[in-house]
Image: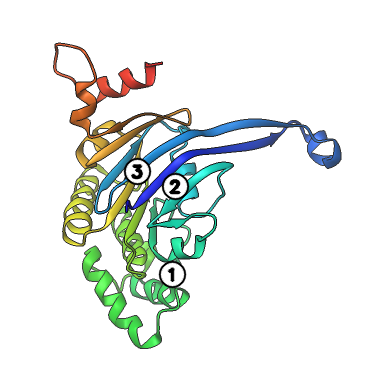
Amino acid sequence: MNAIEIRDLDKEFYDAEGFLRSFLHIFRKKTKKIVLNKINLEVKKNELFCIVGPNGAGKTTLIKILCTLILPTQGHASVNGYDVIKEEKKVRESIGLISSDERSFFWRLSGIENLKFFAALYNLPSSRISKEVTRVIEIAGIEEPDKEFQQYSAGARQRLGIARSLLKEPEILFMDEPTKSLDPLMTVSFRKFIKEELVVKHKKTVFFTTHQLNEAEIMADRLAILHKGETKAIGALAELKKGINQKEAVTIEDVFNYYIEKK
């Protein structure tokens, strides 16, 4: 069984045109925007799979569907064997979500206090909370867990986000452009942590989105190129390079440009 399976997945949004039509709901005219169009892909267990594409390609929308935050318009998606529509509770129990959004933490609480709060929110038994919080702090490498969240660096905040996601012992981790707010040194450290600690050591499946081509090249076991809501290519980078018929050395930029321009 694959960690993630997606078949003919579509997502459409409807936008109201004009203030008057929005106010007069009964007469409101809507325009359809196709955000995802016939997405098909599989992610293997214990794989670091990367979705690469420019801003607006549909990466965040795809993650939100897989994490049961929004519904697809049509098609099928399963995560850890569970249907994202019919078995959303089981999906949520088996995943963790990490993004660059910091607003969900309490800024005046310490790292430990934040984690204890979320552990209780996740219905962990009170007798286990301290032990589980200590466990995830160690895995995430949080050096000053007693410091207030507002005093953490961007990198430390990201690690706290990972620690929170690990409280439920998820098999699959979704990461939506988690390095975009990090400086270059922190980015290198964070990428290494994801690959060596989470994927290799703890056997997690990681579904990772980025708009940085070099990051996809460094991180991914396999990748999918997403452009204007469509998957243009899927596979290991070495395989995708073979599909380009040119004599010179092929870079990931060449791969990206070739497939998004290909009809």
Image quadrant holding the C terminus, namely top left
Reading the image, the residue beneath label 2 is 63
Cα distance in 3D space between marks 3 and 1 = 41 Å
Reading the image, the residue beneath label 3 is 42
Residue 186 vertical placement versus 36 (above, below): below
Cα distance in 3D space between marks 1 and 2 = 29 Å
Residue at horizontal 57 percent and vertical 49 percent from the top: 71
Q: Which mark is residue 108?
A: 1
Q: Nearer the viewer, residue 160 or 107?
A: 160
Residue at horizontal 44 percent and vertical 33 percent from the top: 55
Amino acid at circle 3: Glu
Query: Quick one: label 2, few (<14), some, or many (20+) residues within 10 Å?
Result: many
Residue 233, image x, y percentages: 33, 28
Residue at horizontal 27 percent and vertical 44 percent from the top: 183
Residue 36, image x, y percentages: 51, 35
SS for dot 3: strand
Residue 251 appears anywhere in the view: no
